[in-house]
Amino acid sequence: MRVVALQQGYHCNGVEGRSRGGAGAALGGASPMASCSGMCRAQVSLVSPLVSRRGSDWYGGELAQGRVGQLGSRGRSRGMGMPRAMLQWNRKPELAGEVPRVVVITSGKGGVGKTTTTANLGMCLARLNFKVVAIDADVGLRNLDLLLGLENRVNYTAMEVLNGECRLDQALIRDKRWTNFELLCINKPRYKMPLGFGGKALTWLVDALKKRPEGQPHFILIDCPAGIDAGFITAITPAQEAILVTTPDITSLRDADRVTGLLECDGIKDIKMVVNRVRSDMIKGEDMMSVLDVQEMLGLPLLGVIPEDSEVIKSTNRGYPLVLKNPPTLAGLALEQMAWRLVEKDSMKAVMIEEAPPKRGFLQGLMGGK
Ligand SMILES: Nc1ncnc2c1ncn2[C@@H]1O[C@H](COP(=O)(O)OP(=O)(O)OP(=O)(O)O)[C@@H](O)[C@H]1O
Ligand SMILES: [Mg+2]
């Protein structure tokens, strides 16, 4: 019942999925949108998403079965279910939209997985043969280089390029595993946001990447700092699309809602969300919001759902992106699926998964008992 209602709302609001539902009401804040663009946000009353979820409205069956997002994929595969998803293994994703796609990965709240998402999405896209440049716009607390294991190779940064001390290609660090992936850091670690560095400077860098003689990248991913101050404004300035990373907790959601309003004010219409660190056991126990709850509150199309996975932390500490791990992990598969959706401008639906019926015993089965 709840899913039907959500899906209807979702479709009504089109591919962008911009119902911008009850977040303002549910999260208890004045809608940033109301003052920005005058867009009306329906007052959906979500009392508490953790109440009223007995047994059915949890997300996790797909994660547990390692087919994250495939059943719920929208667009091309809508209504096709598993066969289509299985066919995906035999095809390459078709790049939608104009090249280069400049995508900012943001969240509002810190520590929810922006850098993890940027590093892994970037690697997946490179593995799918797209040229990728990842910009670490988290100037003061950069760590994208660490996650990628490239920290020892950062000799020049964007600041030296802007000061005319080196060329742009000298500041771009090419990954040895996937040479079509490059990293650009803005500044040396622990430096504060340099004076004069802002949205215009970042836009200049993005334009310079577009004009490179060896050809422009297909994707420019910008890892945004936490918060909504100058660093955030700088990071979103050149972007045309945004990936909003959130965890299923109320503080992260409130920040995500605020950031969505600011992105929309800045003219970024293409916003998709990623729900990270999802734990199906907690959702089942009604101790964590389900992905449906999150989607209902933020009203954004869903790019992907990443389960809580200790492998993520291990890969962070080793400087080896999770998606390169063989055999793949659940979180790695989820990130790979997200990369596909990003390429094709697709999104997925959070689906309601009923509790699996209790297993029948052998004798019960023979006798046709229930
Ligand atoms: N799905 C996950 N499962 C387990 N741990 C995770 C997951 N996603 C992220 N983490 C861990 O959470 C921590 C924060 O992640 P990350 O640095 O990507 O967040 P961030 O949003 O970029 O943080 P900041 O706002 O400080 O830049 C890291 O230690 C990372 O390993
Ligand atoms: Mg980060």
Image: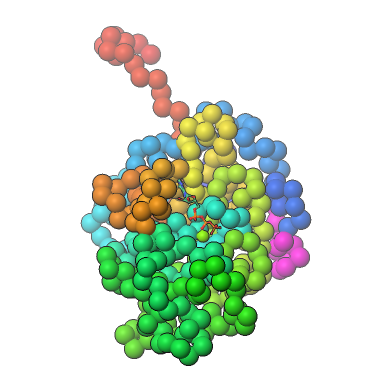
**What is the quadrant of the N terminus in the image?**
top right
> Residue lying furthest left in this view?
90
**Residue 245 lies in the magenta stretch:** no
**Magenta residue span:** 32-42
Q: Is residue 41 visible?
A: yes
Q: Is residue 43 above or below residue 237?
A: above
Q: Residue furthest bottom?
A: 164
- Up-down relation of residue 61 to residue 176 (above or below): above
Q: Which residue occupies 64% across, 45% down? A: 250
Whether 37 is among the magenta residues is: yes
Q: Position of residue 306 (x, y in %)?
A: 44, 48
Towards the viewer: 129 or 54? 129
Q: Is residue 143 above or below residue 238?
A: above
- The image's colouring method is rainbow
Figure quadrant of residue 219: bottom left
Look at the picture and state if 147 lies above or below 95: above
Residue at 40% across, 76% down: 155
Considering depth in this image, is 361 or 167 the residue closer to the camera? Answer: 167
Can residue 343 be seen by looking at this rendering?
no
User: Residue 333 at x, y = what percent?
Assistant: 35, 49
Image coords of residue 65 (percent x, y): 35, 38
Residue 71: percent from left, percent from top: 38, 45
Query: Which sits in the foreground, 116 or 288?
Result: 116
300 lies left or right of 122 = right
Question: What residue is rendered at 36% in x and 53% in y?
Answer: 318
Number of numbered markers:
0
